[in-house]
Image (cartoon, grey):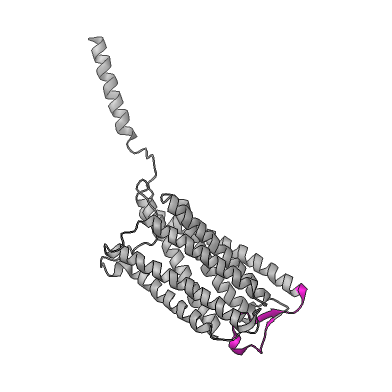
């Protein structure tokens, strides 16, 4: 029960963060396309209070701290389904806790940089930090997948690692090209996809109705620790992996729809300001006509 609750909390946090980033990114771009530049984190745009301006960042601190504590305490639980048994599982969860703590430190340094002059770091440096941390998360998730005896858990960790690699690539692009709007949208979409896949992982591992046919939870594992779902036959295992691949494509489609709907709603609310607007064209034409009339008058004279 604790596993699915943690997955729901992590999923809702990532989805909210990704959607908030998409909305703020589209809003900043549509308000001023010429001066647009990507930001590692957007302040809350609808609050005149300076303290509430960084409310999303404070909530992110809280969620990262809870996730860090969960991974730290989980490292003390035994897991007989991991290759190498409990010691390997302990190191895997401690690696995850360390990565979460690094995300917490980078987020804290960003808040200090935004509110004080102690850390005057440029935004592209924070994108570089984010790229390194997402790549580290990718490496940790791949390592966790390689030692899992549960086929479903290994597949879920492997897919999650690839999404983290995508987020790392988007951060690296933004560190080099901060005015690339598509890359920042891709980063927000990758975070949303992470949230959806965390939810799918929790459902596939802990909820009986979503466990693929031919797979089941092992009742001899205490309190349903990570990797407590097993497929007995190779046919069932391959079928479960194929189902997860299909579900991942569905989640990607859903994220694409979220991006399009979000951009359309923000564009309708803010109003689109395109580059190369033709609003000044009538005045230019009038000036040209005036110049031509003066030249014609001078010629006749």
- Find out whether residue 27 is within the magenta segment: no
Residue 48's place in the image compared with 32, above or below, is below
Instruction: Pinpoint residue 183: horizontal percent, then vertical percent.
Output: 47, 53
Residue 114's place in the image compared with 150, above or below, is above
Q: Nearer the viewer, residue 203 or 150?
A: 150
Instruction: Pinpoint residue 69: horizontal percent, then vertical percent.
Output: 45, 81
> 20 left or right of 244?
left
The quadrant holding residue 213 is bottom right
> 208 left or right of 297?
right
Q: Quadrant of the N terminus?
A: bottom right
- Find out whether residue 222 is within the magenta segment: yes
Task: State the residue at coordinates (39%, 76%).
Answer: 62
Instruction: Pinpoint residue 239: horizontal percent, then vertical percent.
Output: 73, 71
> 149 left or right of 43?
right
Task: State the residue at coordinates (44%, 53%).
Answer: 174
The quadrant holding residue 140 is bottom right
Instruction: Pinpoint residue 216: horizontal percent, then vertical percent.
Output: 69, 82
Do we see residue 22 in this rendering? no
Specify the segment rendered in magenta: 216-235
Report the number of numbered marks: 0
Do we see residue 275 in this rendering? yes
Residue 18's place in the image compared with 206, above or below, is above
Q: Farthest top residue? A: 301
């Amino acid at each position: 029960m604790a596993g699915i609750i943690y997955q729901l909390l992590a999923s809702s946090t990532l989805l909210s963060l990704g959607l908030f980033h998409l909305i703020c990114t589209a809003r900043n771009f549509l308000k001023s396309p010429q001066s647009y530049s990507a930001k590692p984190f957007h302040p809350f745009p609808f609050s005149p209070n300076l303290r509430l301006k960084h409310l999303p960042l404070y909530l992110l601190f809280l969620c990262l701290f809870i996730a860090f504590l969960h991974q730290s305490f989980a490292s003390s639980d035994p897991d007989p389904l991991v290759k190498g048994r409990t010691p390997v599982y302990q190191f895997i969860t401690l690696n995850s806790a360390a990565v979460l703590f690094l995300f917490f430190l980078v987020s804290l340094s960003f808040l200090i940089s935004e509110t004080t002059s102690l850390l005057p770091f440029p935004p592209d440096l924070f994108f570089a930090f984010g790229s390194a941390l997402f790549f580290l998360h990718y490496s940790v998730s791949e390592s966790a997948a390689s030692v899992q005896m549960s086929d479903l858990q290994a597949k879920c960790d492997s897919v999650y690692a690839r999404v983290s690699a995508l987020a790392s690539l988007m951060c690296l692009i933004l560190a080099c090209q901060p005015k690339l709007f598509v890359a920042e949208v891709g980063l927000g979409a990758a975070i949303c996809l992470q949230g959806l896949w965390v939810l799918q992982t929790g459902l596939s591992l802990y909820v009986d109705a979503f466990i693929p046919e031919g797979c089941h939870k092992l009742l001899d594992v205490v309190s349903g620790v990570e990797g407590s779902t097993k497929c007995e036959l190779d046919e069932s295992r391959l079928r479960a992996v194929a189902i997860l691949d299909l579900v991942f494509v569905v989640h990607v489609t859903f994220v694409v729809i979220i991006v399009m709907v979000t951009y359309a709603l923000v564009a309708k609310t803010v109003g689109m300001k395109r580059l190369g607007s033709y609003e000044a064209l009538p005045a230019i034409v009038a000036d040209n006509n005036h110049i031509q009339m003066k030249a014609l008058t001078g010629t006749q004279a």
